[in-house]
Amino acid sequence: MPANDRPRDHAGQGAATTVAAHRARRRLRADRARQLADLLRRQILTGAYQDGGTLPHESTLATDYRASRNTVRQALDLLRAEGLVDRLPGVGTVVVARKYPHGLDRLMGLAETLREHGRVTNEVRTMGPAPAPAPVAERLRVPAGADVLHIERLRRLNGLPLSLDVTYIPLDIGASLLGADLENTDVFRLLEAITGRPLGHAEITLEAVNADAHSAAVLQAPRGAAVLMLERITHLADGRPVDLEFIRFRGDRITMSGLLHRS
């Protein structure tokens, strides 16, 4: 190789090394910002900063969490993108949204779960008998194609859209719900009153899905926004399945929690 080519090669290698190092530092800062955002989010959700409360100054957060100011700013940007905080000139970073806790330790209706946080109301969008799709019939242990009660409700907490619930109930039980006050009463309470038996247990699956156009419009959420999908099949104390639900929660207004034991 000609000697005059070698300096250019070395210069190119040096530039590549510098770019790689810069990218590594940027990735590291992004990792640290995400981790700091997780810690600050937890503080917000547990009430350390109330609605309208101001977060500590960036320099204070940097000292408390042993992070750089750039990392703190990036973490706050992540929380701002989630809609939890906002930056107000002359004030600082303030909490502008709240998530409500939904426990996974006990079998309760939404109004029972959130009774300490306000009033849950239901807008019954559709309700009536409908042929059960095969997976629904199987889960509810009714004949394929048999009619079940189909209910779709928009549920609000203190007037804000919180969840979109689709419910299937065996018709021999569900028929009694047709004249019930579903706008102000949890289905769980009505099922126990109709059957004269307590609910026993439920199997749940929780996952994140993207909101389809219909769900987003009803929940007043951005199309494609992530929502929490809770699938729940609830049984009476004797084991009979009586309620299959698919519940889409606005992920920016609810947080799920539970207590787990290792036996």
Image (spheres, rainbow, N blue to C red):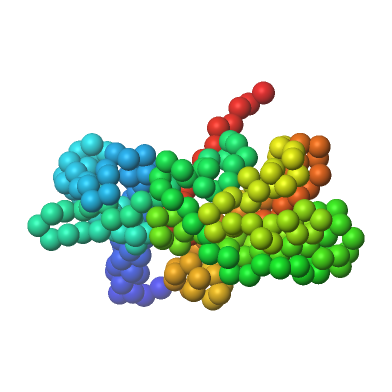
Between residues 30 and 227, which one lies in front from this camera angle?
A: 227
Where residue 67 appears, as percent x and y from the top left, is 26, 43
Tally the marks: 0
Quarter the N terminus occupies: bottom left
Q: Is residue 32 visible?
A: no
Residue at image position (40%, 55%) is 158
Q: Position of residue 60 (x, y in %)?
A: 17, 41
**Residue 222 seen in this snapshot:** yes
**Rendered image quadrant of residue 16:** bottom left
x 29%, y 39%: residue: 48
Q: Is residue 183 left or right of residue 70?
A: right
Q: Which residue extends farthest left?
A: 90
Q: Is 117 situated left or right of 48 in this image?
A: right
Q: Quadrant of residue 108?
A: top right
Residue pushed farthest right? 143
Q: Is residue 189 above or below residue 258?
A: below
Residue at screen point 69% across, 62% down:
178
**Quick one: 112 or 4, which is closer to the camera?**
112
Say whether residue 118 is left or right of residue 241: left
User: Which residue of the protein is positioned furthest toward the top in this rendering?
Assistant: 263
Q: Position of residue 166 (x, y in %)?
A: 64, 62
> Between residues 99 and 142, which one lies in front from this camera angle?
142
Question: Where's residue 31, x and y in %?
Answer: 38, 50
Does 59 sit above or below residue 15?
above
In this picture, residue 37 sits left or right of residue 133: left
- Give the position of the C terminus as an image quadrant: top right
Q: In the rendered image of this protein, does residue 142 appear above or below residue 126?
A: above
Q: In the image, what residue occupies the spot 52% across and 47% down? A: 111
